[in-house]
Image (cartoon, rainbow, N blue to C red):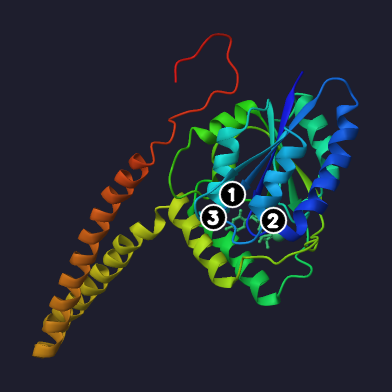
Amino acid sequence: MPLISIIVPCFNEEEVLNIFRDEILLVTNEMAKQPDVSFEFLFIDDGSKDRTLKVLRDFNKLDGRFRYISFSRNFGKESAMYAGLKNAKGDYCVILDADLQHPPELIPKMYELVSGGEYDCAATRRISRKGEPRLLSFFSKSFYKIINKISQTEIIDGAQDFRFMNRQMVDAILSMSEYSRFSKGIFSWVGFDTKYIEVENRPRKAGKSTWNFWKLFSYSIDGIAGFSTAPLKFASFLGILTCIGALIAVLVMVIKFFVTGETSGGYYTLLCVTLGIGGLQLLCTGILGEYLAKTYLETKKRPIYLVKETDHETKV
Ligand code: UDP
Ligand code: MG
């Protein structure tokens, strides 16, 4: 009988947890009427300052299927999702937010898509940014444009963390044990077949969002730094450009001397030397950057490949 693990990161969610529990039980009890599925609920209390932990303890007392892990402090949603996946026992795992912005009603459809074998993952993707401040939309869109230009991993605009995955994909995600986690990149990096279900943006049922502009900004920088080494190559690019500038300046000086017989002033020769040396320095920094990029990627110890299917036991 397949077990489905429902993973819920919670940070100061006392106000919404009871509503969440009612809604998720409505959906899962209905699904469990088919004789072949069972559920566990794994709540990750990410160092909440309110009564979240107390509520989770009560859930557990009432129903043993409700498990919880409480962090010693706030480690962030990425860490909570990792802890959830790492401790889930299910044949399938689904991650969703506590605030009901991710509609639990979609879980049966997601299960159908993934258990059918055609897909390894079903995820939601929001089609509009309605209800979001204009400026934030602008920055979000620019972020996706930039990261998809400079990173080989495709980061899908609007894809949410609401995901239903089979065990194979979960294990692949766990094999990426990097410390700085950017799930939007990791989900895509591991590959496998994902079906996107398009959804409208939904408001929070209760409580407050803890994300603000600066948190999102720093998260997007994490994403760029985690999935692209392009910024490290920037110095080489600038260096080559400056060297070309220096070369042109020298050529102009030489041609001018042969055509008109005039020598250039001291300031001009100095300019050529400064530009030339500056360019070389940038180029050398860029070369260092290349090696740093390689070392950086090695330290992440990402798997060299991930197998989806084979006719025999493979060695990884
Ligand atoms: N969350 C978390 N740790 C944090 C911040 C948020 O576990 O440091 C959880 C939060 O409880 C919620 C989900 O991540 O279940 C999404 O957070 P939120 O609703 O604040 O973000 P938004 O939906 O506004 O992007
Ligand atoms: Mg939310």
Residue at 81 percent across and 24 percent down: it is: 37
Is residue 246 depicted above or below 232 in this figure?
below
Is residue 35 depicted above or below 93 in this figure?
above
Q: Quadrant of the N terminus?
A: top right
Q: Nearer the viewer, residue 37 or 64?
A: 64
Tag 2: Cα neighbours inside 10 Å, few (<14), some, or many (≥20)? some
Choose top left, top right, bottom left or bottom right for residue 117: top right
Q: Amino acid at mark 3?
A: Gly
How far from the left and from the top, in percent, is residue 271?
17, 82
For residue 220, say whether it is visible: yes
- Gap between marks 1 and 2 measured at Cα: 10 Å
Choose top left, top right, bottom left or bottom right for residue 168: top right
Residue furthest out toward the top: 312
Q: Is residue 119 left or right of residue 37?
A: left
Q: Callout 3: helix, strand or loop? A: loop
How far from the left and from the top, in percent, is residue 26?
88, 41
- Gap between marks 2 and 3 measured at Cα: 20 Å
User: Which residue bears the numbered disc 3?
Assistant: 76
Mark before the other along the chain sequence, 1 or 2: 2
Is residue 307 depicted above or below 73 in this figure?
above
Which mark, by number, is residue 184?
1
Q: Callout 2: helix, strand or loop? A: loop
Q: Is mark 3 within 8 Å of ligand 1?
A: yes
Residue at 72 percent across and 38 percent down: it is: 61
Ligand 1 positioned in quadrant? bottom right
User: Which residue bears the numbered disc 2?
Assistant: 158
Q: Is residue 76 left or right of residue 295?
A: right
